[in-house]
Amino acid sequence: MGPLLLCLAVAANAAAAMILEITAGRLLAPHFGMSLYTWTTVIGVVLAGLTAGHWIGGHLAGVSGKGLTKRLSLSFWGGAATSALVLPVLSLLVGGGAFATLPTAPAIALAGFAAFFLPSLLAGLVQPLATKLALEMEGGLSGRILGRMLAMGAFGSILGTFLAGFLLISYIGSAGTVWLVVAVNAGLGALFLPPLARVFGLLAALLVCGAFAFTPLGGFAFASPCDEESQYFCIQVDPADDITGRSSRLLALDHLVHSINDREEPRLLASPYLHLVDEIALRRFPEGPSAAFFVGGGGFTLPRAWQARWPDARLTVAELDPLVTEVAEQALWFEPGQETRILHSDGRVALRETSGRFDVVFGDAFHDIAIPQHLITREFHDLVAEHLTPRGFYILNLIDDPREPRFLASMLRTLQLSFSAVEIWVTPEDLPGSRRATFILYAAQQASGLPNRLASLRGYEREWAQIEVANLQPETLGLVLTDDFAPVDRLLSGLWLAGE
């Protein structure tokens, strides 16, 4: 054992801690979505654990020699053990519904603390112990040694961040990444044991992991809620026959059911908001829109329907995640037509780089109350307006609390700066006594000309109502959302903090 090994151990430990932090966001997303609250919890819990670990590690470093080496080894083994518990804890507590009655934000905080605080605390013990050991080995030059160990910790954190974000989660999944962290910590713990104990320690770790994998708890430890996992989403496909009464499947991205596709009839739309978009397009363009742009693909439910109804329409779909497209084609019966173009790019980037104008631009990239902020700003709305034909319209869905719809009022106020006519539609049963409703916003340079109560012409029998815009008082209740200032999480804080 020498100074080089200590430097590498500190770097590897920091990398493992950061890998677990990045993976934490991915593991919480299937239950709570990916949002500012999710990442705030993850970063805060991990930093709290590291802080406590550094403090305790400083006190534990009061011994010397073999006692110091033993404590360093135990810190790594403790990190391995607590990291191995991450997946069972999430499965038992979150998957088991322990926080189901809590509002979203407190549930995220409790789940994050339960799963990730202890592994972070154990990781925090390492640097003070390793630094003290390095000082004992090298004697003087304490400033240089301290700087070196701090630099190796920072280097490891950078390395772990890039490994987790660009490689590990995409190639071996969240569960595999967690077990890689377990293996790294166990290996580091063994390195600081005497030679014979090192061999027995590694064998014991392998036996424990192997035995654990074949017990009932192994299902909690290795199972993933995802059918597929990409850099962006936890993707699930499930039967939806019980929802539609027909042969159909649903696509869930993270914790949100994004699409429901009917196997035999692509024009049959189970989601009321997609059905309304379809009905408005039918009335505005009876012969079909000549071109349409979709911000977000998901299950490609509406592009699939419009391909079947208007095969000559030019459809452009910006779907950020190629794996989502692949799943839609393989499991949700989506077959891109000759006039359908799929761009695997962010919707705003794709629209900016696309020439031509569209009769319809549909924004369908919001995931429940986790909102991409760059798609709700005045700058984006101006971009949409530039790409619409004179008769074209922009339409999108959002979720808000109808009792105090601050986000809805802000979207209304912002859209009115880019469009002459803005309308708000809702399914009437979403409103009475509801604390959560899905709204459809229609924006164009001319009003839709539709009646205030709209009944479906095709498909499921449904009715939608138009809300009087003046009732929302956008000038007092809403904000102008810009690229510089779009506090969507604050505007939706009632749903995050108080629940549904």
Image: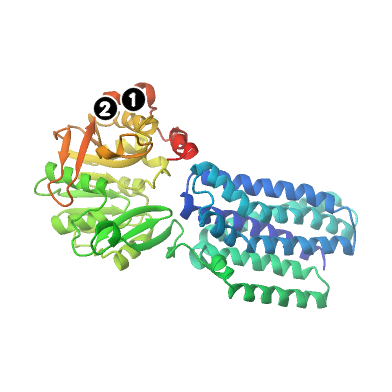
Is residue 97 visible in the rendered image? The answer is: yes
Image position of 440 with respect to 301: above or below: above
Q: Residue at x 82, y 78 (%)?
A: 196
Secondary structure found at label 1: helix
Left or right: residue 449 versus residue 272 is left
Most foreground residue, 166 or 202: 202
Q: Are marks 1 and 2 in contact (CB under 8 Å)?
A: yes
Q: Position of residue 223 (x, y in %)?
A: 51, 67
Quarter of the picture holding the C terminus: top left
Quadrant of residue 411 within the rendered picture: top left
Which disc, if any, is residue 469?
2
Q: Position of residue 366 (x, y in %)?
A: 37, 46
Left or right: residue 37 versus residue 363 is right
Secondary structure found at label 2: helix
Residue hosting label 1: 474
Q: Position of residue 177 (x, y in %)?
A: 57, 64
Q: Amino acid at mark 1?
A: Pro
